[in-house]
Amino acid sequence: MYLLNRAGTPTLACPGRILARVSSAAPPPEVDLRGALNAGSGQITSGTKGGLVYAVAPLSGSGANRAGVLLVHPARGLARSLLGPLAWRLLFATALAVVIAALVAAALAGRLTAPLGRLVGAARDLGDGDLSTRVAVEGDDEVAEVGAAFNEMAAALEQSQAEQRAFLASVGHELKTPLTAVQGYTEALLDGTVEDPAARRRSLERIHAETLRLARLVQDLLDLARLGRGQFAVSPVDADAATVLREAAATWSERAAARGVTVELRLPGQLPAHVDPGRLRQVLDNLLDNATRSSPAGRPVLLAAVQLPAGGAEVAVVDQGPGIAAEDLAHVFDRGYLWSRYRGTRAVGSGLGLAIVKALCDAMQVTIWAESGGGGGTAFRLTLPPAHTIPPPGRRPSQTQELPIPSSSASGPPPWEPA
């Protein structure tokens, strides 16, 4: 540090005893120090010159020998001179930052690992068979999303297991009924209880009918197993769906005649569509089986179809049975649902046929749904996708019709005439 007079002449401000301890003092810079003093009232001038860093600060109200102060330091040694007094502060700040970071990391780790630990425990409980396991979801971060997804998965598994139990119960009941009948009739025949030839024939016919029922149930189970494994071969092609409908109507007219039920067929002509004819026939067989079994004697079952304006066709299988409640329509294709819902009030099948129908329709990209009439009866409607190739001109119907909704509230033929 130097003292400057009004002429800008520098004089060392250190006393002689202190200066004696200094090995070398930074010399004044070769700049206009007088001009720096007179640059402005109280203005500090700084800069570098000849490897020196300097600052000139005027002193107000000073005499001729003390007009200002000059601070000089070698530029290369400035950093080292400042590091000494700042080093301990930097070390302290660094240590404090490390401690704070460690505390924050520990808090965050605890917040993250605690929910993950609960998830691990819940996953193990779920793997051990406790499907009622759930985890508490807190916050809205990613861990909370994982917890919510886990709860949804556990709920879906629990529901699926409940449905599987109900399904197995319905299948067990369906298997037990014909087996019990077959066992009773065969025991009677073996014991000689039935001696009349006509009675023996009736017993054998009953046994035959029950074995056919068992065979159909076993086939339904095999079909469902194939569907679950993706082994159901579906090969859609451009075909005339009307031909499939005529064949199905002819077959089921003969079978339904024994029950006093007729099958009425209404077709506009050809129905070009992109379907698998064999699988479509399987769908129609299931629907017509249910319809002819549900309809009372003397009331017809309708199998109708119309061509859609945009291509494809709409097919309806309409019965005159007791109908399905509105709240049950959304579950008609669930395995065993209708069986468990109506088995005590009406004749129902195994509860597997409609599940197979829905799976086949989905595989062929056929839309299917169920509707109920106001006075009873049920209509199953199918929308067949259009054929990829356009049929020859003049073979398609000129106009489309609206397929009917059944009603069994009045006697005589139901009002099935298209609007």
Image: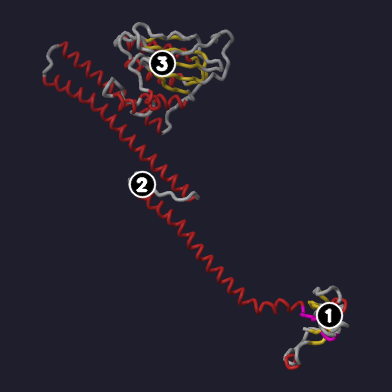
Residue at 81% of width from left, 83% of height from top?
62
The stretch in magenta equals 64-74
Q: Amino acid at mark 1?
A: Pro
Q: Nearer the viewer, mark 1 or mark 3?
A: 1
Other residues around mark 2 within 10 Å, as few (<14) / some (14–19) / many (≥20): some
Secondary structure, magenta segment, majority class:
strand
| 338 relative position to 190: left or right | right
Which label's residue is closer to the chain start, 1 or 2?
A: 1
- Is residue 71 within the magenta segment? yes
Q: Amino acid at mark 2?
A: Thr
Residue 336 found in image quarter: top left
Q: What's the mark number on residue 29?
A: 1
Q: Nearer the viewer, mark 1 or mark 2?
A: 1
| 92 relative position to 341: left or right | right
Inter-mark Cα distance, 1 to 2: 82 Å
Residue 417 found in image quarter: top left
Residue at 44% of width from left, 50% of height from top?
138
Q: What's the mark number on residue 133?
A: 2
Which label's residue is closer to the chain start, 1 or 3?
A: 1
Other residues around mark 1 within 10 Å, as few (<14) / some (14–19) / many (≥20): many
Mark 3, secondary structure of its residue: strand
* Residue bearing mark 3: 317
Q: What's the mark number on residue 12?
A: none
Q: Is residue 378 visible?
A: yes
